[in-house]
Amino acid sequence: MKFFYSYWRADYTSVAQKHFPTAHIISLIIIAFLIYLTYILKYKLKDDKKEKIYSYILGTTLIVNQVSLYYWYIDNSLLTLRECLPLYLCRLSIILCILMIITKSHNIFDIVYFWGLGGAGIALFFNDTSIYTFPHYVFIQFFICHGGIVISIFFMMFVHNYTPNLTSLKRTFKWTIIYFIITIPTNYLLKSNYSYLRCKPNFPLLNQIPTNPFVYVPLFIICINILFVLLYLPFYKTTKTKN
């Protein structure tokens, strides 16, 4: 029990590790395998009964994972407005993924495709795993959360044939603007850093960007929107032909 608790508490002390440690790479491989498994089973999963079972397992995993995170915050006396509001794009994406899986809403997919793949994709590859290393709870929760977002999106694409279109991109731009209008003032009011819209994260690709928030934040927002456009490009010709 004492061993388990040492990997649960927030004051866990880890040993400094190199970028992309073995546990990080294995986690990415597992997520990639589950996506591939969803792809090769897509025709079987089109069966209503099997689709419902898969949806139930995926949705329940996401719900339990998020509930456990807030229990961890409470148990470690870390439940604060500065950290625990659902204002990270990935936390919003988790909520939307759960609703998408339950309702099979294409409108929700339109947003989650960009927010989820953009936010969770970057987080999975460039997350700083040196603070809470494997097998700490936070490490495991992080990869289940972000991996679950990506798997949910590909599930809807492979099994339900959902794809983004130009309207999806426009809708995402609109909701992203609304998100910025809410989150940026909230960050300054609470001195929080939701979605890194107040302070620059420890992210190698951003090392050359000035730390001044009046420079960094606008550039960061531009980069996010460019990423959304790049995520849309694979479907540009397809949606153009349909139109």
Image (cartoon, helix red, strand yellow):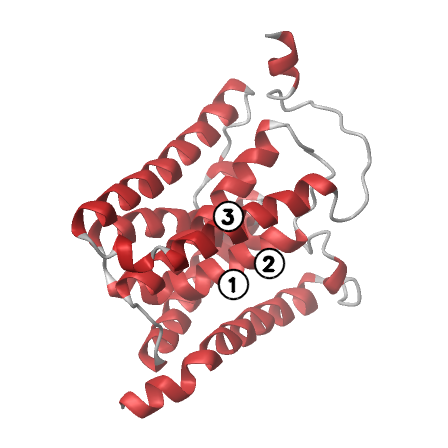
Q: Earlier in the sequence, mark 1 or mark 3?
A: 1
Quarter of the figure with the N terminus: top right
The secondary element bearing badge 2 is classed as helix
Element on which disc 3 rests: helix
Observer-nearest residue: 2 or 40? 40
Q: CA distance from mark 2 to mark 3?
A: 10 Å
Relative horizontal placement of residue 51, taking residue 97 as reference (left or right): left
Label 1 and label 2: CA atoms lie apart by 6 Å
The residue that mark 1 highlights is: 118
Among the 4 quarters of the image, the one containing residue 224: bottom right
Q: State the residue position of label 2.
A: 122
Question: Is there a contact, CB below 8 Å, between mark 1 and mark 2?
Answer: yes
For the residues labelled 1 and 3, the Cα–Cα distance comes to: 11 Å
Q: Left or right: 133 with respect to 5?
A: right
For the point 32% across and 36% down, which residue is it? 60
56 versus 6 height, above or below: below
Which residue type does callout 1 highlight? Gly
Report x, y in % for residue 199: 67, 54
Q: Residues within 10 Å of mark 2 (few under 14, many from 20)?
A: few
For label 3, the residue is 146
Report if the CB atoms under discs 1 and 3 are less than 8 Å apart.
no
Instruction: Tell me the quadrant of the picture where the C terminus can be found.
Output: bottom left
Q: Position of residue 141 (x, y in %)?
A: 53, 35
Badge 1 marks a residue whose secondary structure is helix
Q: Amino acid at mark 3?
A: His
Specify few, some or many for label 1: CA neighbours under 10 Å numbering under 14, 14-19, or 20 or more. Answer: many
